[in-house]
Image (cartoon, rainbow, N blue to C red):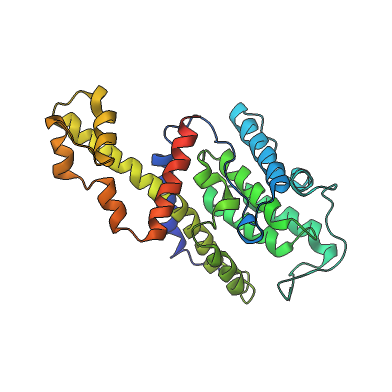
Amino acid sequence: MTMSRARIDPLLEDIEAQRLVVDRSLSRPARWLGPLRREGRRGPQPRERARYARTFDRLADQVAAGTAPELDAALLRSLHASIVGGDGAYRTREVRVGGFTTAARAPAVTGLVEQALARAADGSEEPALAAARLHMELLLVHPWTDGNGRAVRMAASLMLMGHGFKSTLFTAVEQHTTPMPGAYSRAFGLLRSSTPTQHEPWLASHLQLMAWNSQFAAAYRLREDAMRQALTTAGIDPASHDHLMLAYDRGESLPAAGEILQRDFPAWVDLARRMHRDKRTAFARQVERLVAEESG
């Protein structure tokens, strides 16, 4: 029995459309920005964050230079060692996670990790889906007693960077749960009661989080494109576009040249006023992130 893709394919289309807009001004994978997922629950963890950021940035630099190592079991263990500490060795005893025994007995860990990595590398799935599946399968295996989430999300990040994703709105898998932290946990509740052919709910939830994490940045850039086109059609010098658009969105008075913006586009202050507070926060966070990456 094969997995249904009814929910997955539209999400992959959304992610690709948003990637083409969000990543277009970036020449290389962006470096790490912001906190770890666990800091949302446990408060600041500067040492752990610094370890994670160094590892993420090293991988981004290697991808940019064309020297990124192959994502194999040795690299996966080294990522765990770099992020969590120790030597990256797999666990040798059974563990329980959230009240459930993991699917993998300790002696089976090595083989199951190899299978997950081989499937991720075989090219049979789109990069975003392959990265999500690797994330899911490695978490089910639970190769280490601690640090599994951080390590496997880093591996998924490397996969995405290696396939051309650049903004951390896509590549920072560790932060994909920021818009809806509860969705990630709920997805695992469904996964624990599923068979291997029923992974669509978890994968769809993960891809939905990825799509949400970039949708406002993409919308911002598309609105900007439309505004520039309108100004160009009206015969306004492109050199003045940035000034006019910024003044308009700040609520400042505009010269006659900017009247087309007032006529055809809602101002940012009006858009923000109509948004739910959470959407307004997500919009600002995504746009600020993208602008920071573009400015280098």
Left or right of 69 in this view: 32: left
| Point 66% across, 29% down: residue | 67
- From the top left corner, tell me how far across and down residue 81 is, in percent: 79, 46
Q: Is residue 198 above or below residue 25?
A: below
Left or right of 18 in this view: 164: right
Specify the farthest residue to the right. Answer: 92
Left or right of 88 in this view: 291: left
- From the top left corner, tell me how far across and down residue 54 is, in percent: 69, 38
* Viewer can see residue 13: no
| Point 50% across, 40% down: residue | 167
Who is closer to the viewer here, 73 or 64? 64
* Viewer can see residue 81: yes
Q: Is residue 68 above or below residue 184?
A: above
Q: Report the label total.
A: 0
- From the top left corner, tell me how far across and down residue 282 is, in percent: 43, 53
- From the top left corner, tell me how far across and down residue 112 is, in percent: 75, 59
Q: Quadrant of the N terminus?
A: bottom right
| Point 48% across, 42% down: residue | 289
The answer to which quarter of the image holds residue 236 is: top left
| Point 56% across, 71% down: residue | 186
Left or right of 22 in this view: 223: left
